Image: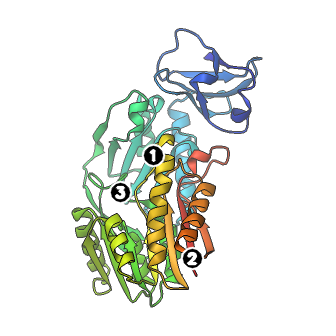
Amino acid sequence: MKRILLRKNQERRIKAGHPWVFSNELWKKPSDILPGEVVEVADGRGHYLGTGFYNGHSLISVRLFSRDKRDLDAGFISESIAKADALRQRLYPGSKHYRMVYGESDGLPGLVVDRYGGQLVVEIQSLGLDIRKKLVIGALKETAGPDCIYERSDSYSRKLEGLGPALGVLHGEFSPEVEVEENGLRFRANLEHGQKTGWYYDQRENRAAIRQYAGNARVLDCFCHTGGFALNAAAGGAASVLGLDISEKAIEQCRANAALNGLEKTCVFEKADVMQVLKRKAEAGEKFDMVILDPPAFARNKKSVEPALKGYKEINLRAMQMLPPGGMLVSCSCSHHIEDEPFRVMLVDAARDARRTLVMFEFRHQAKDHPVLMAMKETQYLKCAVMRVE
C-alpha cells in the first residue's frame, strides 16, 4: 500500500478524527498513485494516521475510511454496511424507512443509502466508492436483501470528484412511486424525481417535535415541499394549516398526502413564490399562531454564506411580523456552510429589526439516522430552531 506524507503540523485535525485530507496538506506522495487507489496517510515523521482512497482531481485528496491498515475490499464494505443498518434497526425498530448509510459517519465516505421498504436508493459522491460500485451493491444485497437498488448519483459534489451523473436501476425491478411511513403518517414519494433520494428523512424527528406546539393553532408552512411539516402540525391538532411552495408538483403531492391521511379538511396548499407572499402577508398585517420555515439551501458554498444569511434574515423577519405575542416560529436551515452560531445570530438580528423577542424552546438538528461524526462538523448540517416570539 502506497504512503502519503503530510506537511508539518497538518496532522492535528486528522488525529482528532476528521477523515478528509486536503490537497494543500500533502507533502510527499508517490507519482504513480492511481485515482481511487487505497493509500496510507502518515505525518511528516512517518507516523501512521489512517487509510483512505486518493483522488488527485479533488481538493479532498484523501478520504480516510479506517484508522487501521484495512483495504477497501468486499469484506470491509459489507461489514460497514451491516454495522450501519444494525444501528438504524435499533433506532427505529421494525421500520423499513430510514437513511441506512450516511457517508463518513458510517465509515464509508461519500456513500448515502436510503431505504424505502424493499427498495434502496443509492447516492455515491466519492471516486473511491464509485469505482467499487459492484462491491457496494453486493454488500447491500447481502445485508438488506432488497427487491430493487436504484442509483441517484446526480449531486453537484460528483463534479468536484471528477465524476459525471449516474442514474439507473442496479438491481431488481424499480417502482418509483412509494409510500413512506413516518410518525404514524403516510406519505407518497417519488424516488426518481423527488428531492434528494425522494424523501427528506433528516427532518423526521423535527416534524414530530412541532406537534406539541401546534394544538388549535393557525399554521403557515412555508416551502412546504410535499407536506411533511404541515401534516405533522395537523396531526398535532392544528386548527388550520396553509402550505406554500413554488412547485406545482409539490403542491399536488401535498394535497394527495393530506387526503391519504384524512387531513384534507385541515390542510390547504397553494402554489406561490414564498418570498413574495411572506412580504405581502406581513405588510397586510395577516396573523398566524405558528409559522414554519424550511427553505432549500441558501448557501451552496462558502462564498454564498453572507447573501444566504441575508435571505434567511428576510424570511424570518417577515415570519416574526405575522406572529402575535406568544406565537411559535420554527426556523430551519439545511445549508451546512452556515453553522449553528451564525444561524442563531441571524435570528437575533431579525428579531431586533422586527422589534420582537425570541425565546428558544429547542435547537434541533438532523434525525438520528444521520449521525454526526464529532470531529467533522460538515456532517452536522441541519438546524431547526423552535421558538416563542414575544
Helix, strand or loop for disc 2: loop
**Pair 2/1: label in front:** 2
Q: Amino acid at mark 2?
A: Arg
**Separation of residues labelled 2 and 3 (CA atoms):** 48 Å
The structure residue drawn at horizontal position 22% and vertical position 63%, both measured from the top left corner, is 249
Check the image and report above or below for 10 versus 304: above
Check the image and report above or below for 361 versus 312: below
- The picture places residue 203, in percent across and down from the top left corner, at 47, 64
- Callout 2: few (<14), some (14-19), or many (20+) C-alpha neighbours within 10 Å? some
- Callout 3: few (<14), some (14-19), or many (20+) C-alpha neighbours within 10 Å? some
Residue 356 numbered mark, or none: 2
- The picture places residue 216, in percent across and down from the top left corner, at 45, 91
Q: Amino acid at mark 1?
A: Val
Helix, strand or loop for disc 1: strand
Residue 118 numbered mark, or none: 3
- Callout 1: few (<14), some (14-19), or many (20+) C-alpha neighbours within 10 Å? many
Asked if residue 108 lies left or right of residue 242, the reply is right
The structure residue drawn at horizontal position 42% and vertical position 86%, both measured from the top left corner, is 238
- Quarter of the picture containing the C terminus is bottom right
